[in-house]
Image (cartoon, rainbow, N blue to C red):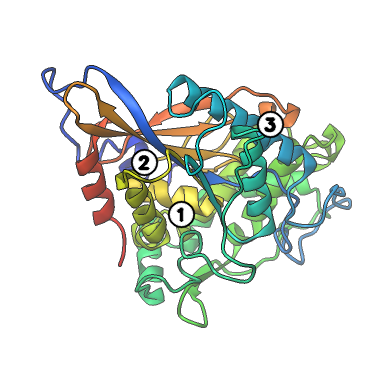
Amino acid sequence: MARPLLALFAGGAMLLPGPALSASSRPKGLAVERVVIVMRHGIRAPLGGEVPDGTRTAAPWPRWPVEESRLTPHGIRALETIAAADRRRFVAQRVLPRNCAAAGTIRIRTNVSDRTIASGEAYARGIAPGCGVAPEHLKAGAIDPIFEPLRARATRFDANEAVAAIERFTGGMAALASRHAAAIALLDRVLGCAPRNTGCTPALPAQVRPAPDGHGIELQGPIRDTSGIAQVLLLQYVEGLPPRDIGWGRADPATLTRLGALHAALFDVFTRAPYMASHQAAILGRHVLETLADPAGPRIEVLMGHDTNVTALAAALRTSLYAPGYAMDDVPPGGAILIEQLRDRESGRRYVRLSYRTQSPQVLRRGGAAVSISGLKMAGCARLCPADRFARILRSRLAD
């Protein structure tokens, strides 16, 4: 179902409409100078607690080939494949040479979790095979503010103000759950729990509140409890588990797309409300702008993080993320926002172009190479946005 204020984000067209480029100012010969990729890690096993304690099912959950939260071998191969597809694109754009690029041309930074580091390593092998590119990350146990700004206390975040903003954006947690009632009922049918009328997940009241330390928020209730389960079911499919193990044979691709709206609803709370977006994307967004502006910086930078990072950046850009086979704003494993800086060879002017790069569930499942790239437009600017205007608008939407 449509969410409150969703129209404000759809393609960015309804907020601060930006002027179109006139025929005389439209660039004639564009060259891609550098690209920043904000990317979700690859296919992983379920996280601890992703299926909440107290969730009832008619049969046991299937086993995974790796420990919880770890990247699977299939997920590693999928990332190598999509990185190879990205490489072909960048070679065709002459951003990368056909052979190994000079040191510093490609920079990959990952969050500190095992799944993001392993994802960065896999991506490096695909985009620069045999070239010795290694991802960078902080030491184990550190909190990287690019990827986890609230935990790092990197902005002046006010949890009470955040809760009020989320309530305004969503209409309240009860209303948010009510809008997704049909998907929650569908999930109950997939879980197949004992025939009680109380549902298959814990019956906790819907509410969002400040975290005890005041530097984050906590969500409980139907969206919190069902969002992770919906994600686990999608992961079963893209991992390539047998059909009988994907929702116990009761979750076909169309069902998974419908259930994906439950996972996407989580981001209405944690990243898409404007107050949350301004804080969740603050350090990442400024890092993107610094990379684009640095003439000595890498030509390709990959920021390998989580779906929260991708959705927070999209929300700060005030655009929505859609790819075939997925619910709106439900970022798949390996999904990424591409931020390209281009230079007009004639005038010397610079522009920014945004795209959303994914692979369909079916392609991920079979380990294929097909890639979907769809254009994005930041609210307040044309798709081909003058670089100085892009930087000014994005910076204005990032919290201190």
| Residue displayed at 24% across by 33% down | 350
Q: Give the x, y percent position of residue 93.
A: 43, 22
Nearer to me, 200 or 335:
335
Which tag is nearer the camera, tag 3 or tag 2? 3
User: Which disc is residue 319 wearing?
Assistant: 2
* 3D distance between C-alphas at marks 1 and 3: 26 Å
Q: Residue furthest front?
A: 102
For the residues bearing labels 3 and 2, Cβ distance under 8 angstroms: no
Q: Callout 3: 10 Å neighbours few (<14), some, many (20+)?
A: many
What residue sits right under mark 1 in the picture? Answer: 268
Q: Please give the name of the residue rendered at 26% of the width and 18% of the height, measured from the top-left corner.
A: 29
Residue 191 image position (x, y, % from top left): 77, 49
Q: Quadrant of residue 387?
A: top left
| Amino acid type at image mark 3 | Leu
Q: Which residue is mark 3?
A: 364
- Which callout, 2 or 1, points at the residue further toward the start of the chain? 1
